[in-house]
Amino acid sequence: MKTIDRGIVFPSLPATDRQSCAFPQVVVLPGGRWLVSCRAACTKGGKDGQHVMLAASDDEGQTWRLNASPFNASALDGKPGQFRALGLTALGGQRVLATLYWVDNSDPALPFFNEQTEGLLDSRIMFAESTDRGDTWSAPTLMDASPFNMPTPITGPVLLLPDGERVCQFETNKPYYDTSPWVHSSVLMFSRDGGRTWPRHSVVTRHPTIFYWDQRPQVLPDGRILDLFWTYDNPAATYLNIHARESHDGGRTWSELWDTGVPGQPAPVVALRDGWIAMVYVDRTGAPAIRCRTSADAGRTWPEESMLTLYESVLPGQTVRKDGMADAWSEMGKFSVGLPATAALPNGDFLVVYYAGSSTDCTSVEWARVKM
């Protein structure tokens, strides 16, 4: 593997509501257009100026056309809100699906995460659709995520199974003031009617002490779903290696979890030629870096000799000794490199987007093109 091109999609603009550009997503449309989204704000951890942005490139990343406010975050249940994340799915032709993560902003002074209870602000999932490659969008509509009537942060875009069934991905958190223990779940919900109803669901992970955060499912060419997890041991207050599990029946049943042997926070895998797959991940064992490895055995092993570094910060390490969840959340809020997303390109290359910058609150969204 080698990096053959790179650039910046959303540059950090100091002292504006685009100073912190983070949490990107990417999709490559059938006609070749690249669409990239991100969450922008004045600071990474704050809600001041928080909104999602969208950029399109029709010349393989050489130029970008910005849509700084593609969606209006309307009030839900009388509560004003903001969009914190935007996932993108190619539906065929010129159609694109947006998966939006709405967060309650009725009290702007409240932080997103309640360190005392480990709860999140009220948050919902919404959808919008474009019929012109992301130039214009329908008004966002609310998803009925029952029986998961709790904060449900999205973990990526809607996926499509080979038969056209849609798969919505999210994780479960507690309501803001709920003092009961937080038991984390990774969930997939399924729709056969274009997203109007979601009658089937699958709890991919649920463990009383291990948090399989930030699930990264991917539908591979053979129909298999391979899901990766940023894995945190809550009692020990330490991160474990990336874990994985797979489904061969459309998410109805899942294999046992396995340890990939790779430290860090993953992106969804990318299918390569001859059954190989690539995994991009954030490595925070030292200076924060974006790296990639390949696997020839369906994701069971990821040899270190296959590793390619896409980005490495000159900053010192950004992990600390933790005594509990509050420390873990505080640590996350200070990361200045992270959250890669991936998309396959028609010629066999693949695209990676991630955020990186000189400090926590000054980050840009960058892209890299990788060739096998």
Image (tube, helix red, strand yellow):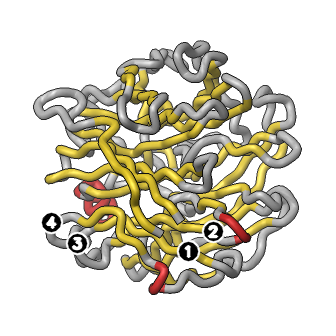
Mark 1 Cα within 10 Å, few/some/many (few <14, many 20+)? many
Quickly name the residue at label 3. Answer: 287
C-alpha gap between disc 2 and disc 1: 6 Å
Quickly name the residue at label 2. Answer: 277
- Residue at the image point whose x is 19% and y is 45% from the top: 361
- Height in image: 249 above or below 134? below
Name the secondary structure under disc 4: loop
Whichever of callouts 3 and 4 sits on the residue coming sooner in the sequence is: 3
**Tag in front: 2 or 3:** 2
Q: In front here: 240 or 7?
A: 7
Quickly name the residue at label 1. Answer: 294
Residue 268: quarter of image: bottom right
Do the CB atoms of the residues marked 3 and 4 lie less than 8 Å apart? Answer: yes
Name the secondary structure under disc 3: loop
Q: In front here: 359 or 298?
A: 298
Do the CB atoms of the residues marked 2 and 1 lie less than 8 Å apart? Answer: yes
Mark 2 Cα within 10 Å, few/some/many (few <14, many 20+)? some
- Residue at the image point whose x is 66% and y is 17% from the top: 131
C-alpha gap between disc 3 and disc 1: 22 Å
Whichever of callouts 2 and 4 sits on the residue coming sooner in the sequence is: 2
C-alpha gap between disc 4 and disc 1: 26 Å
Say what amino acid the circle numbered 3 marks: Ala
Q: Position of residue 290 (x, y in %)?
A: 36, 64
Quickly name the residue at label 4. Answer: 315
Position of 362 with respect to 74 (left or right) is: left
C-alpha gap between disc 2 and disc 4: 30 Å
Whichever of callouts 3 and 1 sits on the residue coming sooner in the sequence is: 3
Residue 94: quarter of image: top right
Residue 38 seen in this snapshot? yes
Do the CB atoms of the residues marked 3 and 1 lie less than 8 Å apart? Answer: no
